[in-house]
Amino acid sequence: MQVWDLLTGEARCPPIPHPGDFWGLFAVLFSPDGKLVLSANKDGRARLLDWQKGTLVCPPLQHSHEVFDVAFTSDGKHGLTIDKADTVHVWELTTGKRIAAPMHYPTNSNGSSKTIFNVAVVGDRAVLGAPNFPVLDLSKFLSEPSLSAESLQALAELATARRIQLGEASSMSAEEWQQRWSDYKPRPAAEAQ
């Protein structure tokens, strides 16, 4: 991969190698601010690179299949990828972690796959290049959690059975865990009012 100045025809960076054969790269896209590029690769990875330095920004985004296309959200903080299995992945780009379960979109009426080759993001929507052009609402993945910090802490404590106080974690006894669950347990809407 290499970035070129289209006015002068000069290379703007040294070549950035990617693994694979002649067909190793399927797509390359600039971030909204132009500082990064996201690539879709035959080796089952998407890569976010600082093209001026030629370095990875986060670990490669690993897929089970070849990656055909990539897209950035409008703020450049998240990326979408489409793989050969007609699956859409949503990623947080500073850590390289998925922020949603992979979403499969079979493209034939009988439920079988006919590969989706592209994705475009407009605002908080992603449009898939497939029959009927499915639209994915990204706002549900990118919005802030609706739980309070206290509720999130309680869920973390319940999931790990570790009490968190002043940034320190310590084990809970079975009785403490039961009490914490009793205090936290969601109540029916009518009761909560």
Image (spheres, helix red, strand yellow):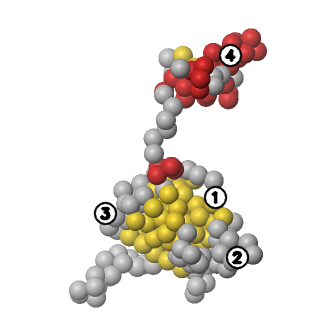
Which residue is denoted by mark 4 in the rendering? 182
Which residue is denoted by mark 1 in the rendering? 102
Which residue is denoted by mark 3 in the rendering? 33
The Cα–Cα distance between marks 1 and 3, rounded to whole angstroms, is 27 Å
Dot 1 lies on which element?
loop
The reply to whether dot 3 and dot 2 touch (C-beta < 8 Å) is: no
What is the x, y in percent for residue 64? 69, 66
The Cα–Cα distance between marks 2 and 4, rounded to whole angstroms, is 47 Å
Q: What crowding class fits label 1: few (fewer than 14 Cα within 10 Å), some (14-19), or many (20 or more)?
A: some
Disc 3 residue type (three-letter): Asp
Give left or right: position of 36 versus 79.
left
The reply to whether dot 3 and dot 4 touch (C-beta < 8 Å) is: no
* Marks 3, 4: nearer the viewer: 4
Per the rendering, the mark at residue 109 is 2
Disc 1 residue type (three-letter): Pro
Task: Work out whether 136 lies above or below 183.
Answer: below
Disc 2 residue type (three-letter): Ser
* First-in-chain label (2 vs 1): 1
Dot 3 lies on which element?
loop
Task: Work out whether 145 lies above or below 23.
Answer: above
